[in-house]
Every structure is written in structure tokens, then in C-alpha cells.
Image (tube, rainbow, N blue to C red):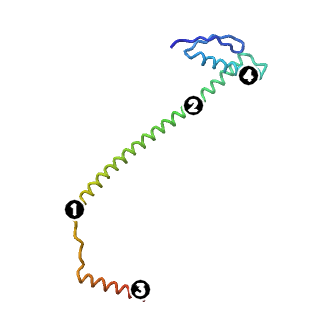
């Protein structure tokens, strides 16, 4: 990638910056640093430009470290979610395989049931009918008392 050069003015001092980053990106960084340093210098007239630069550097290093830690946390959470998703996908595949197996078993059982000869309905004998009638009479008598 080509190197870009930028003449930048930070707190009244001109610097030549060289970077692979775009000129607009470099201008934004310069504006941010200049603004941060000017705020420090305006807030305390005893501050030198060097002191403001050091405070700005420490503040930006702190921000960068905290953002890096937050990014690491997000990467860890994303990894856990991906792992959970893979586990769920595995369980889903197993459940689908079980549904397919049960569907095939069900179809086979239905086919066997359809192919099996029908058993004729059992006819009650006269003795069974008489016995049932007697049993019903006993139950009716028990309910009445």
C-alpha cells in the first residue's frame, strides 16, 4: 500500500505524518489530538505543551486498553455463542434423524397392520349373554339399596 504524507499542526507545532492510512483518517486523528491537548492547556495555564501531550497520550492509551479489553470480551462471548449454536445444531440433527427413524417405523407398522388379515368380531355365546344380564341385574339391585 502507498504511504500518505500529511503536514499536521498540533498546538501550534507542525509535524509531518507518514502512514498507510487515508489522509482523511490522519486528519481526523490530528484534529482529535489537537482538540484534547488544547482542552488540557486551556484548563490549566501552568501546563506545557509537552505535559499536555503526555496527558493526552496516557488518556488515549487508557481508552485503547479499555476498548481492547471490551473487544476481547465480545470475542469471547461470540465464541461461546458459536459453540452453543454448534451444539444446538448437533442436537437438532440428532432429533431430525430420530424423527425420520420413527416416521419410517410408523409407516412400516401401518403397512403391516393393513396387510394383516382382519380377525372376525367375536360372537358372544348364549351363556355369556345370560351371565352378563345376570351381572347387570346384580349391579342394578346394589345401586337401589
**Contact (Cβ within 8 Å) of mark 3 with mark 4:** no
Q: Earlier in the sequence, mark 2 or mark 4?
A: 4
Would you call the spot at circle 2 few (<14 residues within 10 Å), some (14-19), or many (20 or more)? few
**Please, is residue 18 above or below residue 58 in the view?**
above
Sequence-first disc among 2 and 1:
2
Residue for badge 2:
69
Task: Give the CA distance from mark 3 to mark 4.
Answer: 101 Å
Place residue 38 in its image quadrant: top right
Residue with the mark numbered 1: 116
Left or right of 128? Residue 91 is: right
- For disc 4, the marked residue is 40
Q: Position of residue 80 (x, y in %)?
A: 48, 38
Mark 4 or 1, which is nearer the eye?
Answer: 1
Calculate the distance from the C-alpha at mark 2 to the C-alpha at mark 4.
26 Å
Q: Residue furthest right?
A: 45
- Closer to us: mark 1 or mark 3? 1
Say which mark, if any, is on residue 143: 3
Amino acid at each position: 500500500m502507498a504511504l500518505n504524507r500529511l503536514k499536521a499542526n498540533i498546538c501550534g507545532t507542525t509535524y509531518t505524518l507518514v502512514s498507510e492510512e487515508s489522509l482523511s483518517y490522519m486528519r481526523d486523528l490530528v484534529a482529535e489530538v489537537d482538540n484534547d491537548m488544547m482542552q488540557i492547556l486551556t484548563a490549566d495555564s501552568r501546563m506545557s505543551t509537552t505535559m499536555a501531550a503526555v496527558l493526552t497520550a496516557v488518556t488515549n492509551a487508557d481508552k485503547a486498553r479499555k476498548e481492547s479489553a471490551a473487544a476481547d470480551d465480545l470475542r469471547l462471548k461470540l465464541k461461546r455463542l458459536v459453540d452453543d449454536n454448534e451444539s444446538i445444531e448437533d442436537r437438532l440433527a440428532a432429533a431430525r434423524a430420530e424423527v425420520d427413524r420413527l416416521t419410517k417405523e410408523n409407516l412400516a407398522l401401518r403397512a403391516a397392520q393393513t396387510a394383516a388379515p382382519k380377525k372376525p368380531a367375536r360372537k358372544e355365546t348364549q351363556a355369556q349373554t345370560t351371565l352378563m344380564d345376570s351381572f347387570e341385574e346384580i349391579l342394578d339391585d346394589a345401586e337401589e339399596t
